[in-house]
C-alpha cells in the first residue's frame, strides 16, 4: 500500500506540475532596443515565476506595421511614442483602452501623465501611459563652439564643414521652429505645412557645405564628435549624455526654441492576451530601484516623480550639465501625427538627400 501511495503521489505531482507549466503566461513585449534589459527581465521572472517575458525590439514605424498586419495581435504590450498612437488607432484600430485602476499612476510625473493622456484619449478612453522620455536637440563641444545654441547655428558659416545632422523628420521640425514657425500648429493646414516644408528644404540644401557628414546612428555621430571632426550636431540627448562621459566639453544643448520632446509609452495591442501580466510589468519597471536599472540601459529619463534623481550617477551628471530650469519649461512635445504628414516629410527629405548626397 505504501508503494502504491507513493507512486500515486508521484503521478499526482507530475500531473499538477505539468498543469502549472501549461498555465504559465508569456508576456510578449514589443519595445525599443534597450527597453527590456536582461537584468530586469530576469528579476521580473524571478518575482513572477508563472510569467515568461518574450521581447521583440522595434521602432515606431515597425511597431505600427506589425500590429496593423495582425489587427493588433501577436503582442501583449507595445511601447510606441506618444505621438504615434491617436492617428494609428483611428486609422487601423490596433490598440485597446487601458484600465488605469491597475496601474500605480501616482508615481508618474504629472506633466508627462497628463500629456500622454491628452494625446491618447479617444471617446473618453485612455490608450496609453508614459514610460520614458527624452529629447532631440543639439550637441556642441563648448571648448570650440561656446555660443552654439540654435538649430540654424548648424548652418552658420563660422562652422563650415564642422557640423552634422541626421536627415530625418527631426531636423525638418527643428529648422521650422528656428525659422519662426510652429510646425505642429501647421499640421491642421496641410497646404501651410507644405509651404513651411518647402522653405525648410531650401534652407537645408543651402546648408550642405557646412555639413561634414550626415550621421545615421549614434555610434558614427559619437565618433565624429570625439575625433574633433565636427564641433556641433543635431542629436538625440542620450547620445550626447554618453559622449559627455568621455569628454565633458561636449554637452547636449537644448535649442533656444525648445528641445523636441518624445515620451515612449505603455500601450496595449487590441488582441493582447496577457493584460494582467502587462500591468504587472508596467508597475514593476516603475519602482524606483528598477527605474535606475532601466535608465542605465535606455539612456532616457523615466516619466516618474524625481526621474532625474533616479538616473545612474554618470547620466545624472550629463543631464545636469545640459539643462536649466528655463530649458525644461521650454520643451516642445511632439504633436500627434495626422495622416499624410509623414508622406509629406518623406518627400521633403528625399529632395534634400538628392541635392546633398546625404
Image (cartoon, grey):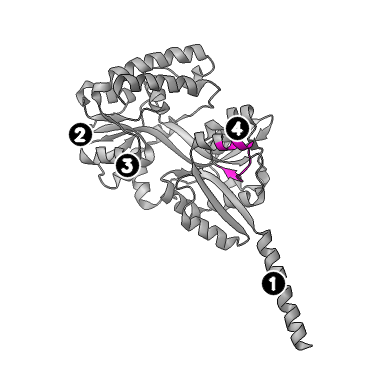
Comes first in the chain, label 1 or label 4: 1
Q: Position of residue 298 (x, y in %)?
A: 43, 46
Query: Which of 182/76 is in front?
Result: 76
Q: Position of residue 130 (x, y in %)?
A: 54, 40
For marks 2 and 3, give the CA distance.
Answer: 21 Å
Q: Which residues are drawn in magenta?
A: 66-78
Name the residue at 72% across, 75% down: 11
Query: Which of 109/286 is in front?
Result: 286
Q: Quadrant of residue 74?
A: top right
Checking the image for residue 144, the label placed there is 2
Comes first in the chain, label 2 or label 4: 4
Residue furthest right in the image: 1
Q: Quadrant of the C terminus?
A: top left
Comes first in the chain, label 2 or label 1: 1
Q: Name the residue carrying label 3.
A: 219
Name the residue at 27% across, 32% down: 232
Closer to viewer: mark 2 or mark 3:
3
Q: Is residue 3 left or right of residue 180?
A: right
Q: Is residue 118 visible?
A: no
Disc 2 crowd rating (10 Å Cα; few below 14, some 14-19, many 20+) is some
Amino acid at each position: 500500500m505504501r508503494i502504491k501511495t507513493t507512486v500515486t503521489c508521484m503521478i499526482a505531482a507530475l500531473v499538477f506540475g505539468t498543469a502549472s507549466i501549461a498555465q504559465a503566461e508569456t508576456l510578449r513585449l514589443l519595445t525599443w532596443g534597450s527597453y527590456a534589459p536582461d537584468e530586469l527581465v530576469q528579476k521580473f521572472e524571478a518575482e513572477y515565476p508563472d510569467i515568461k517575458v518574450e521581447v521583440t525590439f522595434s521602432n515606431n514605424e515597425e511597431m505600427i506595421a506589425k500590429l496593423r498586419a495582425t489587427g493588433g495581435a501577436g503582442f501583449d504590450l507595445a511601447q510606441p511614442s506618444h505621438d504615434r498612437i491617436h492617428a494609428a488607432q483611428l486609422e487601423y484600430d490596433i490598440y485597446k483602452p487601458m484600465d488605469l485602476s491597475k496601474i500605480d499612476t501616482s508615481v508618474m510625473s504629472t506633466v508627462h501623465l497628463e500629456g500622454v493622456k491628452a494625446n491618447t484619449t479617444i471617446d473618453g478612453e485612455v490608450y496609453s501611459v508614459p514610460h520614458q522620455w527624452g529629447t532631440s536637440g543639439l550637441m556642441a563641444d563648448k571648448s570650440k563652439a561656446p555660443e552654439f545654441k540654435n538649430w540654424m547655428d548648424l548652418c552658420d558659416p563660422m562652422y563650415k564643414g564642422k557640423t552634422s545632422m541626421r536627415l530625418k523628420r527631426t531636423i525638418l521640425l527643428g529648422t521650422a521652429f528656428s525659422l519662426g514657425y510652429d510646425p505642429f500648429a501647421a499640421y491642421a493646414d496641410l497646404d501651410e505645412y507644405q509651404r513651411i516644408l518647402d522653405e525648410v528644404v531650401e534652407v537645408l540644401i543651402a546648408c550642405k557645405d557646412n555639413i561634414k557628414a550626415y550621421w545615421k546612428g549614434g555610434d558614427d555621430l559619437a565618433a565624429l564628435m570625439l575625433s574633433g571632426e565636427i564641433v556641433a550636431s543635431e542629436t538625440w540627448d542620450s547620445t550626447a549624455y554618453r559622449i559627455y562621459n568621455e569628454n565633458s566639453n561636449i554637452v547636449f544643448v537644448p535649442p533656444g526654441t525648445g528641445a523636441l520632446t518624445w515620451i515612449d509609452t505603455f500601450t496595449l495591442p487590441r488582441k493582447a492576451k496577457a493584460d494582467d501580466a502587462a500591468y504587472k510589468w508596467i508597475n514593476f519597471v516603475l519602482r524606483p530601484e528598477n527605474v535606475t536599472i532601466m535608465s542605465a540601459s535606455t539612456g532616457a529619463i523615466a516619466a516618474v516623480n524625481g526621474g532625474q534623481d533616479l538616473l545612474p550617477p554618470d547620466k545624472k551628471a550629463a543631464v545636469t550639465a545640459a539643462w536649466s530650469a528655463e530649458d525644461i519649461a521650454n520643451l516642445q512635445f511632439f504633436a500627434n501625427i495626422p495622416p499624410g504628414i509623414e508622406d509629406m516629410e518623406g518627400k521633403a527629405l528625399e529632395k534634400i538627400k538628392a541635392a546633398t548626397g546625404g
